[in-house]
Amino acid sequence: MTSATAIVGSVPIENIDELVISVNLYYDDQGWLVAYFPVGDEPSWSWQAKDLNLEDPVFSDASDSTLLYAINDVLLEALNSDPMTPD
């Protein structure tokens, strides 16, 4: 959806086992870029599980998220900006 002041779209992000998760994004003319899942989607989809060791599945980096991947895709590909890094 596109309006005069905002764009809402979806970005596919690959997670564990080739699972592709669609992340919704909102971007407006004030500079807001928000990644979110629709109501009812699994909250666990926000975590990236690509590099987990199946023999010792310790989740140690909560900042490595599907939502951040989607934001960085838009920053890099569409806006030609530097990617975000979590604080």
Image (spheres, helix red, strand yellow):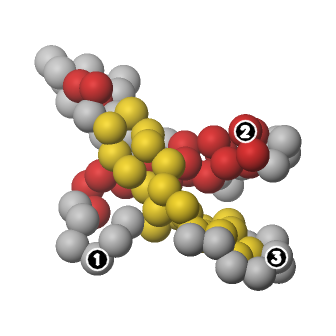
Residue plotted at (84% across, 45% down): 81
In this view, which residue lies farthest toward the left? Answer: 55
Which SS class for mark 2?
Answer: helix
Residue on which disc 3 sits: 29
Q: Position of residue 43 (x, y in %)?
A: 27, 63
Q: Position of residue 79 (x, y in %)?
A: 81, 49
Quarter of the figure that contains the N terminus: bottom right
Foreground: 53 or 81? 81
Residue on which disc 2 sits: 77
Q: Quick one: label 3 or label 2, which is nearer the N terminus?
A: 3
Q: Find out whether the residues at labels 1 and 2 contact each other: C-beta distance under 8 Å.
A: no
Residue plotted at (76% across, 81% down): 5
Q: Quick one: label 1 or label 3, which is nearer the N terminus?
A: 3
Disc 3 residue crowd, few under 14, some 14–19, many 20+, Cα 10 Å: few
Question: Mark on residue 83?
Answer: none
Foreground: 74 or 55? 74
Q: Position of residue 31 (x, y in %)?
A: 80, 71
User: How many badges with numbers are in the image?
Assistant: 3
Separation (CA) of disc 1 from disc 2: 27 Å
Disc 1 residue crowd, few under 14, some 14–19, many 20+, Cα 10 Å: few
Q: Quick one: label 1 or label 2, which is nearer the N terminus?
A: 1
Observer able to see residue 78: yes
Foreground: 40 or 78? 78
Residue plotted at (67% across, 55% down): 87
34 to the left or right of 5: left
Question: Mark on residue 39?
Answer: 1
